[in-house]
Amino acid sequence: MCLFTKHNEILTRALEEIKNRGFWTPYFEIPSSKVYGEGKKEEAINSFKSQLNNRYEIKGLDIDKYLGAEKSPYGFDLGITYPSIDADILVENSKEAMNQWKKLSLDERTGICLEILDRINKRSFEMANAVMHTTGQPYMMAFQAGGPHAQDRGLEALAYAYKQLSAIPSESIFEKPTGKDNPPIVVNKKLKLAPRGISLIITCSTFPTWNSYSALFASLVTGNSIIYKPHRNGILPIALTVDIAREVLEENGINPNLVSMIISDDRTQTQNLVKNKNVKIIDFTGSTSFGDWLEDNAPQANVYTEKAGVNCLIVDNYDNLKGMSRNISMALSLYSSQMCTAPQNIFIPKDGIISNGERVSFDEVASMIANSVEKLLSVDERAVEILGAIQNSDICKRVEKAADIGEIILKSKNIKHPMFENATIKTPVIVKVSAKDKEKYHNEHFGPIILLIETESREDSLKVWQETVELHGAITAGVYTSDEEYLEKVEDIAIEEKVNLSVNLTGHVLMNHSAAFTDFHATGDNKAANCALSNDNFVSGRYSVVTIKRDA
Amino acid sequence: MCLFTKHNEILTRALEEIKNRGFWTPYFEIPSSKVYGEGKKEEAINSFKSQLNNRYEIKGLDIDKYLGAEKSPYGFDLGITYPSIDADILVENSKEAMNQWKKLSLDERTGICLEILDRINKRSFEMANAVMHTTGQPYMMAFQAGGPHAQDRGLEALAYAYKQLSAIPSESIFEKPTGKDNPPIVVNKKLKLAPRGISLIITCSTFPTWNSYSALFASLVTGNSIIYKPHRNGILPIALTVDIAREVLEENGINPNLVSMIISDDRTQTQNLVKNKNVKIIDFTGSTSFGDWLEDNAPQANVYTEKAGVNCLIVDNYDNLKGMSRNISMALSLYSSQMCTAPQNIFIPKDGIISNGERVSFDEVASMIANSVEKLLSVDERAVEILGAIQNSDICKRVEKAADIGEIILKSKNIKHPMFENATIKTPVIVKVSAKDKEKYHNEHFGPIILLIETESREDSLKVWQETVELHGAITAGVYTSDEEYLEKVEDIAIEEKVNLSVNLTGHVLMNHSAAFTDFHATGDNKAANCALSNDNFVSGRYSVVTIKRDA
């Protein structure tokens, strides 16, 4: 059975669900042995252990240079090295593979991509360990965000690409009437897919698969070849991805160099690759400075970036403060706020708010939030499964210097991991800042550093929030208010500044959450990100159509 | 009846036809009084005459500065002046109008846009005169390309915009199961359209409406406001467009400042407008130098450009040389090659070609083409209806200096127009060039200057063609060959360089032709143009979606 037919059901459903945008996921998010196979979890751990301090071999690569020096945020060196191929060779190989790939039919390409996704899904336990020990995510998150949720994102982008391409006929007949007594003018047309070129995917250290699978599958379905450039401390999840993709390609008679990765210790090699005339698509998740550099220095390419933003949350007059504090404490603590969707700036009027008809002071609101965080993280064994480990030492330094930002409301404390004694685990630090001190909160303090910001008034909260987003962008925003008129103003600003908004969340859903098929990740129209995962715009710049016309 | 219902039939059909890409046009292309109304043609001429040497009043603009100094290429000054409003005021008015417009429903916006198109269509005779006497197009072309064909392009873009936006629900319910015994997690979502911002449309002097209606309707349907910046010698067709749009908007209770135009004698005002932070979309047709400047100097905006390209045609071994010469002669002569789709470089092997088993020398092929042009234009009364008038004096100078490029094969001659004695009308000049002299043909000689280029061989023709397109871009390409193997190579290059290709055209269809709903105008992926009219990519960057989520 051809792969397209094999996976047709999932594609058909995906094409519906990108239009519904309710809840749907085809890849099961629970690390269940019923779904993923008896003993698979343990096998995956053993497989991970056997990879440590070894070469990661990728089939079909005849190379003797191996590089890599990843460290697990859980406190040990991975010691894994990966094949390092010269950039110029990668580019030539990539072009050659693309020439074969682009000539396949849309259904052939799509079928192979769906098989790759399926194969990646089956190895979600392996991915969980790879993601956990490069990003520092707690195990459950590493399984979900690194595995099924990332796969959902890939499938979502695949569906958008398929939707667009399948609406373009491969042939058409132009038949123009020329009056009753004359024959029509007839021209035959062939419409040929032209992929844009090599698609370079530069991944980050925190969500290497989740943030890149949309690009991977959008680019592949539209006929491009892929070169991954993983973060130096996030290679393993990408190596596993590349390895699986190549395996499926090879099984189907496709040149596996269609999907490759560059591992280099030479910065200029990467920079040259970015500017290479054959690299026509670049997807990047990471720092604002490198994202801006990419946008300015690769004029030959379509550049899709997700950079830093400053996510804000407004606390206004609101009745359910208990529910609010519980929800915020989880939003702040999850993966130690190392998520591009986590709130950082929390605006609260200096005279406090009204809750159930009574005034609650700024300090009281601050205490409620701080107490909720303390309570949530009071048991170490539970805390480590929420916090994960700190991804890099810069974050630790920032946490330690948080007192420079403002008055400490809740101190960060170090936690011992029961299984990984050298893991770096820190609870969030909460700091109080005045809205007048813009230089303190007009930038991203990546990691578990939370700012409670005293504004002049409810109206001032709106003003300083809007200003922050306009100047610095944001992936998410949130508000707690029981005043529908106030909410209307907040919504208007969210639409004007193009930022997704969470309103009065007190249950399981956090403002951090972004799920494929329901949440567009970023809007693609403020300074934090120039694209959204995924929509028509994420896909439409990855190909063009060449028409060949000929008299009939 | 609401406007959406009134025009629903045409929209439904348009949505189908963008997927068929055969032949379809809803706006009748013949200047027929049966379709457009008895006496309308004469009325339009009288209306045009009454506009000459007068102010063009636009309703609702309280202004006392009027500017304009257009000259008809048919040899007289229009003497029409247009209201000139300060750029800053235009921007403020535009923003205010957009705030109302974006809150309408998709169907409301679409209905109003369809009504604007319909109203523009009804005034096609007026548009014909406006286009003829600013661009120099012959009357029939001015009617068709300036009228119904431009309207087709507008409708096509409208359909793509409607297709995308109508696939995004305005609300959704996220309902996630949490196991048999627990209630699901439910979150309500509102998905709000966020237009990108002010859409600045900078139009050209040759096809002001045809080249801008795609942008106009793509931007309007997606919620943006419009500021037109017409070419200083192409104001009248845009003024008419803006006037009609404002009339329809006002009738429907919409702030008419949603569609406005800037007329200024101060270059810095335009440059500041381009860089204005509220201008988030720029569409431009015109010179490479200004297009490149726009791409580099408006980082806040999505910039869509159609610039100069070098359109090439390969003459290979081919049997029907008579049909070929006739077709080429029309392609070269129509509107004096002042079309961005007209062929300029014609590559012919220096040793000639094989036709019906016999060798035909380079010079013989050249003569056949030259003779066809002479024959086509031998009767002045007919010639002027094909050639139109020369749009500007720079083109005349280039034609006069054509001998500097190479040996003249066919001289340009001046023709008297029977109705407009001061019109500038010139037949094409044909020049012979060696493929080695790249500096002679590696650029656009805009206007009726045709280069027959001697290549080393059939293979060399492919090489020099590919090199030209790779370096300088092209909107179109053509080939005449009876060798299917050779054709395959040509097609592969066309796909690689992303240029639309015409094969062996000998009938009524020319390689210049580009019709909405069947031809993508440009591919959007070579140096001549970064967008195509119209496809998903032309529309998808003009809006984003802001999601507002809230616990149910």
Image (cartoon, coloured by chain):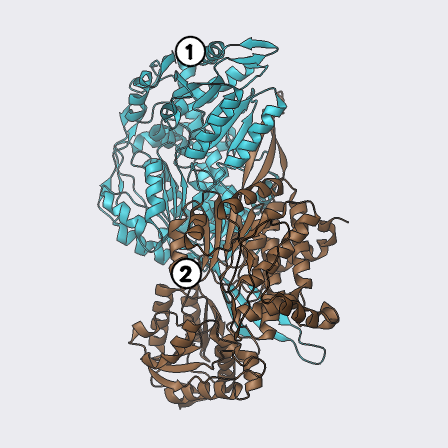
Chain colours: A cyan, B brown
Return the x and y of residue A469 as percentages of the image width and height: 45, 32
> Is the residue B375 above or below the residue A134 in the image?
below
Based on the displayed image, in which of its 4 quarters is residue B194 positioned?
Answer: top right
Q: Are marks 2 and 1 on the same chain?
A: no
Secondary structure of the residue carrying numbered label 1: loop
Q: Which one is in front, B394 or A491?
A: B394
- Callout 2: chain: B
Q: Quadrant of the C terminus of chain A?
A: bottom right
Return the x and y of residue B506 as percentages of the image width and height: 53, 80
- Callout 1: chain: A
Tag 2: amino acid: Asn
Q: Residue at x 63, y 38 (%)?
A: B170
Name, please, the residue furthest toward the front: B64
Question: Which residue is denoted by mark 2 in the rendering?
Answer: B526
Can residue A530 be seen from the camera position used here?
yes
Question: Which residue is denoted by mark 1 in the rendering?
Answer: A379
In front: mark 2 or mark 1?
2
Based on the displayed image, in which of its 4 quarters is residue A427 positioned?
Answer: top left
Q: Which one is in front, B361 or B490?
A: B361
Secondary structure of the residue carrying numbered label 2: loop
Q: Residue at x 68, y 59 (%)?
A: B118
Q: Which one is in front, B550 or A486?
A: A486
Return the x and y of residue A407 as percentages of the image width and height: 36, 13
Tag 1: amino acid: Val
